[in-house]
Image (spheres, rainbow, N blue to C red):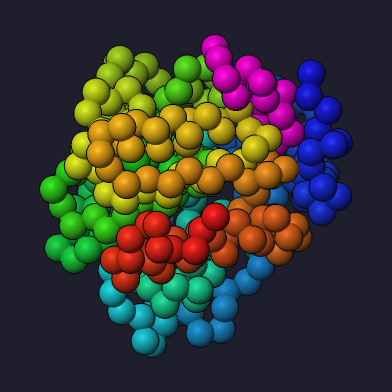
Amino acid sequence: MIDYRHIIDDATWQFIEKTNSFYPENVVDATVGEQRAIYNAMCAAFHAGIPKDVVVTDGNVGSVPVRQYHQDNSSGPNVVYMHGGGFVVGGLLSHDDVCAEICAATGLRVTSVDYRLSPEHPHPGAYDDCQTVFDHLIADPVILCGDSAGGNLAAALAHNNRGTPVLGQVLIYPGLGGDMNRGSYQRHAQAPMLTRDDILFHKDVRGPIKAGDTRASPLSDTDFSGLPPTVAIAAECDPLADDARQYRDAIQAAGGRAIFIEETGLVHGFLRARHMAPRARASFARITRAITGMAARTPLCEIELL
């Protein structure tokens, strides 16, 4: 068993402990409603506020709620952001400050998608909502971005909308449908913040998924050609880490452009640690540099990421 005390630094442990302080020991027995309330309270405690120059506007695209962020001088492509939360928790508030800070750091417009959650709305409900927003925005170039479950949805959009003006995708500790019986799924099965059992729970709650459905499991695709430039970022101490690595390898093997970054000593959900832990802060800066570079159509190899 891995001794995480020798991998994770003190600042990141403080983040882990603060997060865990919101979760009772019997959280596995909590209802979905109770889990959402706990998650929302935890996210609210980490909320870092909205940068003063960022304007926030709520609206709808069809029946899908969205929250948009811009500055007076915002221009260029739209960043479409899909939040994490295992397809069960999260929403516009859970990643509000993350999206606002992406807007502030890049100068780009950001649209956050409040997709429907499981189990009330099983797959492909979440994907369909993201597709609705994508279809509304794709008249102009977009950059796809998301963390965890949101990274899955971003990649799923890329696979199912080839030939559209997607300038790139930035996937943050994404779950992409990798083999759960090998690699990081086994090596980090008991990692802080996310365990293999947690992933199995969320997979089951999402509902039955047919083999090869790239709307749910982008790694199950048989064709990785024609995908946009991709930055896939993993946390070292995360069962999902190998998904990002394998995704990079598949795109490169198909002749595409992709970069994999494994963030040393970080854990799943580290975006919320960006104001507590230097490693998370450095990763968030890499994320915003990747988005800025994609917006400028800079080749991945010329963006300062590694």
Q: Quadrant of residue 207?
A: top left
When the figure is inspected, residue 151 is found, relative to residue 80, above or below; the finding is above
Question: Which residue is at the front of the view, 217 or 27?
Answer: 217
Q: Quadrant of the N terminus?
A: top right
Locate residue 229, reporting x and y percent. 31, 51
Query: Magenta span has 230?
Result: no
Q: Is 125 displayed left or right of 100 in the figure?
A: left
Span highlighted in magenta in the image? 181-196
Q: Quadrant of the C terminus?
A: bottom right
- The chief SS type of the magenta part is loop
Locate residue 152, reporting x and y percent. 41, 38
Locate residue 165, reporting x and y percent. 18, 57
Q: At 48% across and 43% down in the image, what residue appears?
A: 260
Q: At 50% across and 74% down in the image, what residue appears?
A: 105
Question: Which residue is at the front of the view, 8 or 196?
Answer: 8
Query: Magenta span has 182?
Result: yes
Task: Specify the farthest residue to the top.
Answer: 181
Q: Count how many numbered circles sit on residues in the image.
A: 0
Question: Which residue is at the front of the view, 271 or 60?
Answer: 271
Q: Is 1 displayed left or right of 171 in the figure?
A: right
When the figure is inspected, residue 13 is found, relative to residue 210, above or below; the finding is below
Task: Specify the farthest residue to the bottom.
Answer: 72
Q: Quadrant of residue 36?
A: top right
For residue 161, say whether it is visible: yes
For residue 150, say whether it is visible: no
Q: At 86% across and 50% down in the image, what residue appears?
A: 10
Q: At 32% across and 54% down in the image, what residue appears?
A: 168
Locate residue 92, reporting x and y percent. 48, 56
When the figure is inspected, residue 117 is found, relative to residue 210, above or below; the finding is below
